Image: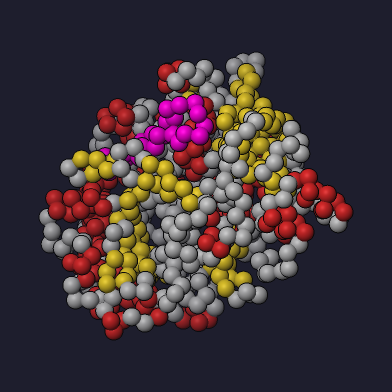
Amino acid sequence: MYGYKLPSPETVCVTAMWQASRCIILLTLLGLVHSTVITNETSTLATSFEYIVVGGGTTALAVANRLAVNHTVLVIERGPDLVDDEVINDPFTTFGTPSPCHFQIQLAPQMGFNGSRVIPMTYGSCLGGSSSINTMIGSRPTYAGMSAVEALGNPGWGWNEFLPHMQKSETFHPPNPTQHAEGANFIAVVHGFDGPVGVSFAQPLIAPTLQDAAKNTTNTVFEGAVALSPDMGDGFSGGHYSSYYHHIHFNDTLQMDRRSSSAWSYLYPQDQQRVGLTVLVGHRVNTILTSTEAGGNITATGVLVEPIAGGTASTFNSSREVVLSAGALYSPAILQRSGIGNATFLESLGIEPVLDLPGVGANFQDQILLTNVSFPLAPSANITNVTGGGEVLLAVVVAHPTAIDTLGSNGTSAMNTLLRNISAERALSTGGIVASDALTTQAALIANAYEIDHPLIEMFYTPGPTAINVWAQSVLPLSRGTIRINTTDPSVDPIADAQYLTTEVDMVVAVAAARRVSSIAVTPPFSELLIENALAEAGVPQVGATDDEVSEWVLSTYTPGTHPVGSNSMMQRELGGVVSPELLVYGTTNLRIADASIVPLSVFPHTTLGLYGVAEKAAEMILQTAAGN
């Protein structure tokens, strides 16, 4: 499936970005008209498709691929096709390396020490979206996390129902005997072995000496309460640590690892070509076109599309459904420009409300990362088995401590007290929630998850040529923000406000995570890999620092987790939900959302593999509707 072959005529069309008409002529002559068409021209395209997918990112291409097996599908992506971009395709490219797919949105001023901070959030804008630029960490939600999602009024979204969709998306490559001996492991029954997305450990396993030291030190720091797991994707990662797999695949012919982006999983491979699939790049959707049916329900009839480079707008019609898949940052903006959202807010911008749905753009959330932590290596430790040599992946070892693990014997009760007595006042005042019950209900479900075994924080170890990064991340933040447009101009980014660390519980978690990072740096055998004053050199608070000192460091240095979710949440409408468990926008007959914006809680510690599950489940539900009609 992933082996290198001489470029086929289809690949030539994709790679060269030929005009659609030239590609179709060539493919027709060669009898290969069954191929997917990728183009930046609208003039030769049909004007009507059964399905229109808005966006060409992580979930969009997966949904489109499944629908296009027997239906006509148009995908509209504002970014370029970067099929041959090695910055993207090489999984060892450092995160943040500039490429035509890397973009940043400036967040609204966020909480800082002695004032506010202006922080950017990185995202991908090309075919494959953020799966083309992310760190490829192979993270999955937990049983407790998906139970919380289901309890928000989403039957059929529990772990047991959701796991098969994640399995359907992946081809898991088990570790070879050498990798296994060096610490890699897996549980076969929770994985898929014939899906489009390659998931594997890097070959060879990166920095096995560091991995061993990281595991032993984690065990010591958490006094044996955090144990080795054979597979962090089994739904029970709380209280465990492990070597980590990534969504990469090993190309046997090239003898090298390659990124398994959504584009390289569901779009480019020859066996994923679809006769009914057309992908339009370099264009953005201005608005979703709608009509009002008898009884007041809204039907999506198509989209208004315009080229990024400027020029004439085009209208494309949909005979079945429109699937919005532009991500947590941009899907709410498209709905708002289309007249779907808080009616009072829309009227203030001169937009005629089509559907009053106050939850659009609310419940926006993101984890925080403590990333400014780089511990210098001792000269004696500067060997490939510690540094990884020239090939480095983020998070080669990951730990998921629970509330008790992180906060001590009273950890769960401490979280219970904070969560079950949460104040919704700030979130209400900023628009992050539309009703007090929205926050208190979510807080109670998070407390329930912590009582089972849900991770409180994530800690991960990453080798580098002269230093080792030990980062920490919150997992289930309760701070809630908004995505709002302030103009009808689609070229202007919406205002994204994550409201990081604006609840007491989130600060408690962040401070606890920072303290654990400090402890790791002074605990052998990990500390033996570092220079003597590594903690001071890294600028991390000392082990005995006060809460105020640690809080100051957290507020001064945290960065976005860049796992934004929730801005079109799947939950009950009265709580501010936007979509039903079938992912239909409330009040519509055929407008669905399938992307990170529907995830109501940050239960995907790293979003991509979970989002492939969302895409597979969405496609199945859409096809079931089509079969019923």
Residue 428 in view: yes
Decide whether residue 540 is among the magenta residues. Answer: no
Q: Locate residue 539: give its quadrant.
A: bottom left
Residue 623 in view: no
Q: Give the left or right position of residue 583, taking residue 418 as reference.
A: right
Predominant SS along the magenta part: loop
Pick whichever, 261 or 355, lies toward us: 261
Magenta segment: 479-502
- State the image coordinates of residue 100 (x, y, percent, origin top left): 53, 52
Instruction: Classify the position of the C terminus by image quarter.
Output: top right
Q: Residue at the spot x=44%, y=63% of the render?
A: 94
Decide whether residue 488 is among the magenta residues. Answer: yes
Q: Give the left or right position of residue 155, taking residue 498 as reference.
A: right
Pick whichever, 390 or 449, lies toward us: 390
Pick whichever, 361 or 217, lies toward us: 361
- State the image coordinates of residue 478 (x, y, percent, origin top left): 32, 41
- State the image coordinates of residue 627 (x, y, percent, origin top left): 74, 38
Q: Residue at the spot x=50%, y=70% of the render?
A: 201
- State the image coordinates of residue 476 (x, y, percent, origin top left): 36, 47
Pick whichever, 27 or 589, lies toward us: 27
